[in-house]
Image (cartoon, grey):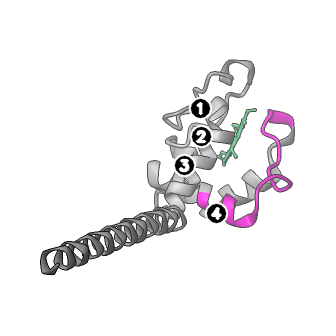
Amino acid sequence: MGVGFSMCSAAISTEDAMIRVAVAVALIGLALIGSSVHAQTSLTPIDRGQRLYQLNCLHCHGAALDGKGPDAASFDPPPANFHSYLSRVKGNDQIEYTIKQGKRFLGMHNWSDTLTDKEVQDLVAYIRDAAPQVDVK
Ligand code: HEC
């Protein structure tokens, strides 16, 4: 009798332990989901700009930002090389303006309809990170 009772309570405590483990696993899972969501929202402007660039600009301006994307051959003048001196002397606001307005007769269309101001700023951050602006005095 005494033995039976203690076995019974052992069984309950095992079940209890399993529930605790299940709850712990669920909590860890939630924590992981939470941290991956957090990781997505804490991307830097440069990271976000790089994604936007790869989606929208790479096929003309090239993976290396050198104006030699797969579609570049059909443009004359070619898409801008962001490493060129002429591009790097331009101010960030000038680059931002060109992205928004496009260059109508050169094949670079305007992005003000499709991208938000913040997305354009992220693109500039990425372009400047890969090809820093030069100071002219
Ligand atoms: C269809 C091809 C094409 C696409 C797509 C394209 N561009 Fe261009 N881009 C051009 C061409 C052509 C020029 C003109 C080159 C010149 O000014 O000599 C240009 C010029 C520019 C300039 C001016 C360069 C400078 O130094 O003054 C910027 C900035 C620019 N593009 C940014 C972008 C960004 C950012 C994207 C993506 C959102 C993009 N472009 C998408 C073709 C393209």
Q: Is mark 1 within 8 Å of ligand 1?
A: yes
Viewer-proximal residue among 37 and 108: 37
Q: Mark 1 highlights which residue?
A: 67
Which one is in front in this view, the residue at disc 4 or the one at disc 1? Answer: 4
First in sequence: mark 3 or mark 4? 3
107 relative position to 68: left or right: right
Q: Secondary structure at mark 2?
A: helix
Q: Secondary structure at mark 1?
A: loop
Q: Mark 4 highlights which residue?
A: 121
Q: Which residues are magenta?
A: 105-122
Marks 4/2: CA distance? 15 Å
Marks 4/1: CA distance? 20 Å
Location of residue 106 in the rendering, given as x and y in whole percent from the top left corner? 80, 34
Marks 2/3: CA distance? 6 Å
Viewer-proximal residue among 41 and 3: 3
Label pair 2/3, CB-CB below 8 angstroms: yes
